[in-house]
Image (cartoon, rainbow, N blue to C red):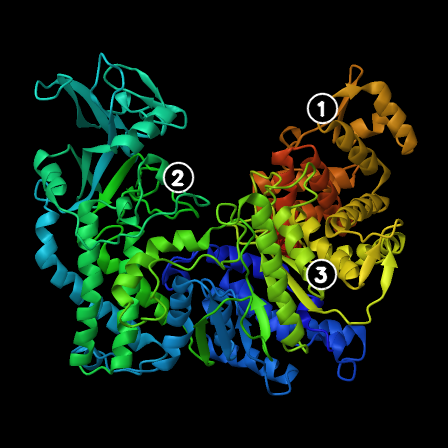
Amino acid sequence: MKRKLIEVSLPLEAINKQAAREKSIRHGHPSTLHLWWARRPLAAARAVLFAQLVDDPSACPEEFASEDDQRRERERLHEIVERLADWDNVRDEKLLAEAHAEILKSTGGAPPTILDPFAGGGTIPLEAQRLGLDVQASDLNPVAVLINKALIEIPAQFRDQPPVFPGLAEAEIRNWKGAEGLAADVRAYGQWMRDLAEEGLGPLYPQADGKTVIAWLWARTITCPNPACGVEMPLARSWWLGKKRGKQAYVVPSVVADQTHPSGKRVEFSIGTDSRFAPASDKDGTVGRQGAVCVACGSATDLKVVRAMAAAGGLGRRLMAIVAEGDRQRVYLAPSTKHAEIADEVAAPRDAPAASLPDQALGFRVQAYGFKKWADLFTSRQLHALVTFSDMVALAREKVIADGGTAGYADAVATFLGFGVSKATDYHNALCAWRSDIKNEGIGHLFSRQAIPMVWDYCEANPLSSSSGNMRDQWTWVAKSLESLVPAGAGTVAQADAASRSYDGVVVSTDPPYYDNIDYSDLSDFFYVWLRRSLRSIYPELLSTLLVPKDEELVANPFRHDGPAGAKAFFENGFRSVFSRVCATADSRFPITVYYAFKQTESEAGGDASTGWETLLEGMVRSGWVITSTWPMRSELGNRMRSIDSNALASSIVLSLRPRPEDAPVIDRRGYLDLLRDELPPALADLQRAAIAPVDLAQAAIGPGMALFSRYARVVEPAGSSVSVREALRLINSVLAEVLSDQEGDFDKDTRWCVKWFETHGFDKAAYGGAETLAAAYNTSVAGLDRSGAVYAKAGEVRLLTTAELPTAYRPERDEHITLWEIAMHLAKALDESGLAEAGRILDGASARVDVEAVKELAYLVFSLAEKRSMVQVAGMFNALVTSWPEVTAAARAHASAAPRATEQAMLALDDELGD
């Protein structure tokens, strides 16, 4: 079988850069169609799919005979991958055709069908379709199935069609490409729904002081348990409303007499703006992790007591503030009795979603506070509005048909309108906090993470306003995501269990569930109950169950499978079943690719093992797969890490795998270790040349290490038992440490002393005698180290200088005692404090005197040592140095080319001066 590009080389830095950039792209991004948890970046999926199908040049010796020929061809393919990964090119039909032609060339003109059996948010099938491939997507979860239908099935069915809403096609005479016509109809019919709903809902959302209200801010309450008080006690995490300089606003609670209340008093709220009396912090409210404090009597109440009171009698609520639209700013108003009464008088609809919340679920906290049904997560007014909009989806469908659309097209438009209502629930629930910490203070949404946490003071948004969460914007986001699609290849979507579906003749690329990281089915019930109400008549079979199916969901949920042991066994058995079936029947000409979001919270000391990661690898090996490569795919915003800990690793790993031959041999532990020591060093050198982030190096090393391990039917211990995946990972880590240590041979003797001193002491001071002994071992001297400018040696004490102690404007070309250590430290300092230009100047000045690649090797080693010593800031600086290495070297080249011009200009200026 021909090796594919993904099994040999990827332009990883360029892919990761674009993947990180995607996090800041919102308008038109497919993720804005509807929320799904843990989506992979589109850039990564496009690059992986292309590299999975295209031959590596080394597999075509008849065409690329020499290593130089292969290198040049690989660079050409890398350039295509880099352009594919760029979000700006997602609709570049010429580029997509070029990429498709390369795929056709490597597949004999008959590319395979791509299947994702855990399709989730649809990233992989969508990007396969964008590359012109036929795709299949399946998932057990009906919300995921609907998302995939909306991304790859429906747009392809109605490609290049004009809109049907009256007047749209006539008002804009043009060629409607892709899903543009469908997007225009979603906007138009969404606006029609919003305008029609306003007639009935308008009185429920009155203006305040003649201004449109953005949100009403409420605090939950309990009765103060202090017998001498008994006031209605507000539970607020913070009093802040807005923090813009000169426009600060905050809630001011005060206690006033009230004989109508049993306690004889009540808490009243007003708005403060004087910065002298502003709250001291964001956590200055009345409730926190430990409990609550009464603003009337000052009594503290343990959180356990608050939970018990909430579960027994429910939580009350009080209106704290009103936020209204002003002239390019928010206007904060004191609570109005009239507004509170209007909200309180709205009755919850009798037919609101009645399904129950799970008794226990991963990431859920609200059940402990008396929330028992999904409807309990919404106010009565929110339920009334959402029921109204959900039921109007059917009316809009009828209008599409009346306006000339086919029944199928009306179903398509209605699907996207239903998505808009479902998206709105993320903002229109009673668990949304007011965000005073963002640039334009606004309404937060529930799913900022994969959980349903308790929120004490919450905001109730106005769906008829023009601010965050309004209904019109939901359909606008949906329409923009449709416009970015390129519905090329055929796509089919089905609800199916990955453990029992067919894999005949397909090539798999998938992003499976991550052990116990995310409870997809329980979380997605939040949206499902609304999608079911809006769309059940269109998808009666898919939406037939009251809640999302859960029994066969492949996650290690201890609440569902008799505790941790049962959950682990369920996940492992299901995982092996899936990938054994794939191994037996999938198209063997191509590797499969599997994404895994690495989470090491369950790791042992030293970070050598992770239950989820280990389980995945064990499952793959036992299912008959050889791991041919692993690639860390990073999706964080930016490269500068400032909180590196045992979990701050690549956001996901991509593995490529092929079936293991049935006659695979057996090897003993010693033989495997010898192979690791032979084959891992050159593989790591390739990864370092590609500027793999130091924080990712250990995970990238698993690829070549596990490729060796999985190549054999068994790796045998001396006693005859099999070496486990956990032990193999430990051996790989051990050899990795050896390789990094061996690279010290490329360093000058002073740098080697610095490395050893740093490994032992960090930047702490130690006795002169120990430094002298170590210096003798490395054939250097403490006095010489002191003169180097990297070491302080005075008064019987020695220590390495920190980057903060190093001088600025360092000139390596003038350094009389230059060392790699000093160069690396100054580069890390310059990049952190001044930026790329300054780092480039230093690297350019050093390039004639030291091996700059050795500087990068040293940065890897310093990162590794700093991480072991839990030196977070230092590790972050050296991680940034390596990940920015291509930009730093480019800045060095730019400085080198600019220097002669600057010299020439200076000479001309001098000539002019002398001439005058």
Q: Which amino acid does label 1 sit on?
A: Asp
Q: Dot 1 corresponds to which residue? A: 764
Left or right of 5 in this view: 912: left
Q: Dot 2: few (<14), some (14–19), or many (≥20) neighbours within 10 Å? A: some
**Disc 2 + disc 3, Cβ < 8 Å:** no
Q: Dot 2 corresponds to which residue? A: 365
Q: Which of marks 1 and 2 is nearer the N terminus?
A: 2
Q: What residue type is labelled 2?
A: Arg
The percent coordinates of residue 580 (x first, y second) are 65, 67
Task: Please tell me whether residue 4 is drawn above or below residue 632 in the rendered image.
Answer: below
Residue 518 visible in the shown view: yes
Q: Dot 1: few (<14), some (14–19), or many (≥20) neighbours within 10 Å? A: some
Q: Dot 3: few (<14), some (14–19), or many (≥20) neighbours within 10 Å? A: many
Location of residue 707 by image quarter:
bottom right
For the residues labelled 3 and 1, the Cα–Cα distance comes to 45 Å
Task: Please tell me whether residue 384 is drawn above or below residue 127 in the rendered image.
Answer: above
Task: Please tell me whether residue 648 is drawn above or below residue 795 in the rendered image.
Answer: below
Residue 280 visible in the shown view: no
The foreground one among 18 and 202 is 202
Q: Which of marks 2 and 3 is nearer the N terminus?
A: 2
Does dot 2 land on a helix, a strand or a loop?
loop
Query: Looking at the rendering, in which quadrant would you find the N terminus?
Result: bottom right
Q: Which mark is residue 212?
A: none
Q: Dot 3 corresponds to which residue? A: 621
